[in-house]
Image (spheres, grey):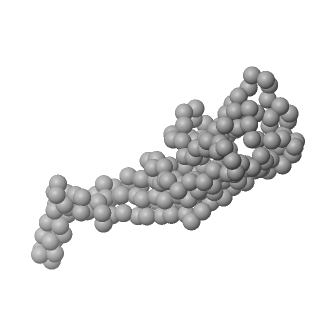
Amino acid sequence: MRALSRVLLSTALTLFAPGCRKIADTFFVVNAETEEICKSQRSIEFAAAGPDTRTLTYVFEFPLGQLGADLPEGRLETDFRLRLFQLDVTGGGVDLSGLESAKVSLRRVGADEVIRTLLEYQQPSQAFSPTQLTLRGVEAASVAELAREDRLELVFETQGTLPARAWTADILACAGLRAEVHYFDFIF
């Protein structure tokens, strides 16, 4: 019994040693990932733009689910990958070909500052649909502790010549979430 106590004590002390800390940190890890979460919002009303208005901003709330609720306490690293953001004009008969650029940024619910721009669009000279704007992405945004949130905000901003009459649109956003918790510090 004394031998077992010594082994356990020496193993625990070894894990606290500077060189072994990285090794222990790699063994005490939990990974979780969502395949894809999609959310749509239908019949969003946009007002007619005035002659001096060149920017349109719309905030879209995006659910993350309960992924973070099931993770243990520890240092949490989160990758959020917005794969698709699509805006389809559904009413008003407007033409979006006057839009010069668009971007979708990530921010926490209720915050004023964006964390990071996820997708950007510059109007090409050809091959543009006047009633649909589609942005696709593959790069992940790494945001600490994001998976502990149950939702976030996607900020859609576009610049250019905006429609001079009221219109409606549908928005579809699809994203994946990966979380990794290093919980070695919280075991001992």
Q: Residue furthest front?
A: 125
Count up the numbered dots.
Answer: 0
State the residue in front, 91 or 188.
91
Horizontal placement of 3 versus 39: left or right? left
Q: Where, quadrant-wise, is the N terminus in this rendering? A: bottom left
Q: Is residue 123 visible?
A: yes
Horizontal placement of 3 versus 76: left or right? left
Q: Residue at x 12, y 74 (%)?
A: 2
Q: Residue furthest top?
A: 52
State the residue in front, 175 or 13.
175
Res 112 quadrant in image: top right
Q: Residue at x 33, y 55 (%)?
A: 186
Q: Residue furthest right?
A: 92
Q: Is residue 153 visible?
A: no
Q: Residue at x 83, y 41 (%)?
A: 94
Q: x, y (%) of residue 35?
A: 56, 65
Q: x, y (%) of residue 120?
A: 58, 44
Q: Residue at x 54, y 33 (%)?
A: 113
Q: Where, quadrant-wise, is the C terminus in this rendering? A: bottom left
Q: x, y (%) of residue 149?
A: 55, 49
Q: x, y (%) of residue 64?
A: 59, 54
Res 175 quadrant in image: bottom right
State the residue in front, 21 or 95.
95
Horizontal placement of 140 versus 8: left or right? right
Horizontal placement of 111 versus 5: left or right? right
